[in-house]
Image (spheres, rainbow, N blue to C red):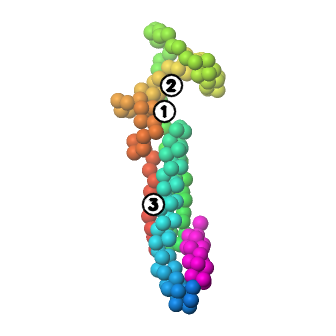
Amino acid sequence: MHIDHYVRQVQEQLSAAAALGDERTQQIASTIAAAAAPSVRLAVMAALAAAADEITAALLDAPSSPTVAVRLDGDTVRIDVVGAAPEPAVPRADEGDASARITLRLTEALKADVEEAAAREGVSVNTWLVRAASSALTRGGDRPPWADAGRRGHNTHRVTGWING
């Protein structure tokens, strides 16, 4: 995406507004429009970086979600979507030695979702739940993965940007 197009739009709008004035007003507006070009570039870049930050934050709810990076290369804005690194394999519990029992109460909708997920993986609901619990406990840290949901700054996703030119 070329940023010059957007800078020219701002300059044209300033010139159009100044066209109502005398020749001196038009000269001043032309000088201001030229001087404002770097500021407009930075403002557009900042807006794009903020949008990338919001997009990345919105993607945090998806497992293995990508990150969005924005960079300015000369007069061209580059947007990179980087896929997340695959999650490490979760060690599987030895289902043959399991002897502990618990009673688990779920909503009908959640139960149906769990049954569907287990069927997709070709395992029993019990095996799926054991794997899900093991996965949640092996992600590291003392807090469960859902504890920081919605809190910015507590994730592994980053938005980066730089200016070359």
Earlier residue among tags 2 and 1? 1
Local secondary structure at mark 1: loop
Magenta residues: mostly which secondary structure?
Answer: helix
Local secondary structure at mark 3: loop
Residue 31: in sight, yes or no? Answer: yes
Task: Sort mark 3 into few (<14), some (14-19) or many (20+) by Cα contacts within 10 Å.
Answer: some
18 within the magenta span: yes
For the magenta stretch, what is the residue range?
1-20
Quadrant in the picture for the N terminus: bottom right
What kind of residue is marked 1? Ala
Residue at 53% across / 47% down in the picture?
66
Residue 111, image x and y in percent? 60, 19
In front of the other: 66 or 124: 66
CA separation, marks 2 and 1? 12 Å
137 within the magenta span: no
Residue at 49% across / 46% down in the picture?
57
Residue named by callout 1: 89
Observer-side mark, 2 or 1, equals 2
Residue named by callout 2: 132
Residue named by callout 3: 161
What kind of residue is marked 3? Gly
In front of the other: 34 or 94: 34
Residue 64 numbered tag: none
Cβ atoms at labels 1 and 3 below 8 Å apart: no
